[in-house]
Image: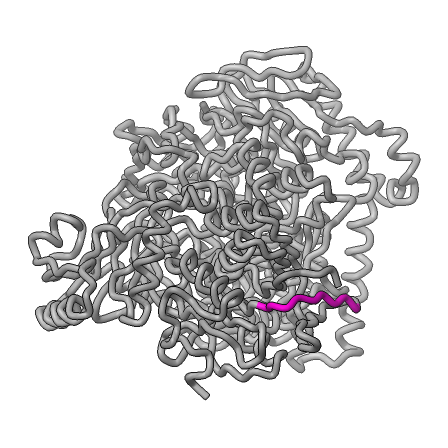
Amino acid sequence: MSGWGAIVIGGGLHGLSAALQLGRRGAKVLLLEADRVGAHASGASAAGVRTLGRDPAEIPIAVAALEMWRGIAGLVGEDCGFVQSGQVKVAETEAELAQLGERVAKVRALGWEHEEVIDRAELRRVLPAVAPHCVGGMIVRTDGFAIAYRTVLAFRRAAEAAGVVVREHSPVRGLERSGGTWRVRLDGGVTEGAPIVVNAAGAWGPRVAMLAGERIPIGYSAFMMLLTSPLPPFVTPVVGATGRPLSFKQLASGHVMIGGGHKGTGDLETGTYRLDIDRAAYSARTALELFPALEGSEIVHAWCGIEGVGEDDLPIIGLGRSEGLVHAFGFSGHGFAIAPAVGEMVAQLALYGQSNLPVAPFNPFRFS
Amino acid sequence: MSGMVDVVIVGAGPAGIAAALEASAQGLSVTLIDEQPAPGGQIWRGVEQAQGAGTLGQDYVAGADRARALRASGIDYRPATTLWHLDEAGVASVLSSGHSDQIEARRVILATGAMERPVPIPGWTLPGVMTAGAAQILLKTAAAVPQGPVVLAGQGPLLWLIAQQLVAAGAPPTLILETRRASPVATALGHLSGLWRGREWVAKGLTMMRAVQSAGVRVVTGASGLRAEGKDRLERVTWSGGAQHAATLLLHEGVIPNVQVSLALGLAHEWDTAQLCWRPRLDAFGATSETRIAIAGDGAGIGGWQAAEARGRLAALDAAHRLGRLDAAQCDALAAPWQAELGRALAIRPFLDALYRPAKEVLLPPDAETIVCRCEEVSARRVREAARLGATGPNQAKAYLRCGMGPCQGRLCGPTVAALIADERGVPVQTVGTYRPRAPYKPITVAELADG
Amino acid sequence: MFRLRPEARAAVRVTVDGRDVSVPEGASAAAAVLLAGADAIRQTPVTGAPRLPYCMMGVCFDCLAEIDGVPNRQACMVPVREGMVIACQRGARVIDPEAA
């Protein structure tokens, strides 16, 4: 017991971001990571910084986060490889394009103007390599992407500079509340205590919640990513599809990253995963159909990130039933972009019981 | 998907061929896949059609018998077939002539052999710098020898074997830079029993060294501080105290197990303090921590081809036992002679490992600008910087710098990246672990994957 | 730079970057590149540095070449065939190697 102000459980990007914001607000923070920092979804992320196509509930957070990304070096001391390359969602049929048009109209009616529909000619202009059958799309020109692991390490260093103590290989075994303090039980008979606990344990979030007696029944997935060897530059924005899962981007180094929701099999006990070769093949087919030029390019690497997934594809963000407990996990494969803003929300929830950005849609107990 | 087989064996070198012949003899259905176009592995490369095999020695001739036996066996042998993914359930994804296929097997024997230890000296990426083993493969498969001044640098039995083969092929090296530090006499005194059991081996080695020296090849011993220099190709080799104009530099600091697939599968590995490399944790029959998968040959730990054959036989007998073809007593009885053979073959190793222990500068390049990851061109300096910025192990460095994420998948930079991080953190190299390689084990094109 | 041993039977004709070369059956495309005396088999995608085969056993991937029109093939793993066309792979692009 060493009088911590807050204990953050989980050393992914969300845990680090929350710890950073708590630290900046003067709290003495201990961050506990069961494995190593960024070992799962955060380090394995495609690292898209996307406001495009967000669920309306997430739009305010994504827009606030994008503002933070523009000044990310001021927040964490380096640019994290962030570029505003734009993000495009491609329509392969007229029906899909109509669907995108409705979507943009709906979002505009809510007062958000970041998305726009583009026609075939404009799609060709921003994506010259796209397959001829594509008819148009939806774009946010100020969106972009960062480099996942660089971001994780930058957040870690910034958090440590703000006084956060990061302890890796420290799985949490028990959580008990007594006398206004959480007792966090670790291996080897070690217990740490703090009035505030943040559960940012990603796919393991429900297990941590259960240690505090709170049932938050969400699932998890192992999101699969493919990486090609470096290719001459041919795609600038991050690309998604409308009718099927795809996330596609080319890094400054020429490598192409292909993801978008195809899943392998994760194992929460061991933290390991298996690729699903059939799904990887499907993913390769989708990429090839949208970008025929990829045909002879080589896939040099494939991996998965194990991530918590809600039934409604929205994260868990909010106060627990117990006092001094905040949950922030289950970002369902699209949490990277919003991590800077969610860190602030979590710090506000933990310290003041409320957040500047709306959290109601992310109520931890909406499934029970 | 091809049909279910009893055993899929990966690699048709000494271990893989022995395993295939034994498994087949015990009545198991076998599929043997191999990347190379012909059987033999590295030691017996091109053995079926070697031109001038006479200069390559007796061990090479033994390979011709094994290749013939394999061809005569009727085993489903698939050359030019690359394993790019394997799962614990025994489904092997393979690539052959641009098509992906899956083979489902009750058991898997990995016989993926060894690779030469990376020798990351300044300039080792220059055209003209190769491994010594590469020169041997060129000699075996293409009857090709280096032209212009050749420097052989490093240490170990293979270095001298290749020197002798080049002499016999009429292309003697200009200079041998031997990097060995250990004294043969002092090392021998520490390993007398192994040395006695391996005496024929030692005699053979001495004959090779004499043959090379009597051909007038200059030998510099105790060489250190090696550099390959030149603009767009090798022009000069320098070392502490000397320089030599050279067209070809052949590097060799021994061999290490090729653990790419076993690491990718997440099998338990242990650090071999004698051979300074990782190797899979195995039982006496080669079974791994995943009981469906066994490993035989130099991929189990460096032992040479006789040990590899014995390990192949043992893994196959174990497969036959586990699949109900042999009871425990039968299996043990059949295994006994191979266990004895394995013991004989391994007896000399502790002496060799001590004698040819690589110098620290081979494991940990002292020059900061030395390229460590050849694929992504990442220098030692950048790996050290990443370690200081919080990349605590090779996988973190990979995520940060993309070293080890190029087409070679970290095969050539893995040991060095781990050593640099360990050095930067001030911890033993085994504590920082290894890359966890990921499928595809060998690159597969988007079209090939899409086709699968 | 490599040469054939005098007694070698070089029966297979291939071209390397437009140069004709005869090599023994069973040799790899990478061996043909070395026998042809090419300056490089590829240029690295990161800095455009020239490379020639390094390991010849399928480990290092420094022999990636375009063979019969198919790019990125490991030349050391591909046996020569009569009439094979091997081309140096020029993947050079100037980018900042520090950029991730």
Highlighted range, magenta: A189-197
Left or right of A43, for residue A188: right
Residue B154, by quadrant, is top right
Residue A20: x and y in percent read 53, 54
Q: Is residue C90 visible?
A: yes
The secondary structure making up most of the magenta span is strand
Quarter holding the N terminus of chain C is top left
Left or right of C9, for residue B389: right
Of B348 and A319, nearer the camera is A319
Q: How is the image coloured?
A: one colour
Residue A272: x and y in percent read 56, 67
Of B427 and B411, nearer the camera is B427
Residue A323: x and y in percent read 58, 76
Residue B215: x and y in percent read 67, 17
A18 versus A83 height, above or below = below
Q: Residue at x 71, y 71 (%)?
A: A185
Q: Residue at x 54, y 81 (%)?
A: A321
Q: Residue at x 26, y 42 (%)?
A: A233
C10 versus A352 height, above or below = above
Of B249 and B432, nearer the camera is B432
Left or right of B38, for residue B177: right
Of A257 and B147, nearer the camera is A257
Q: Residue at x 66, y 37 (%)?
A: B424
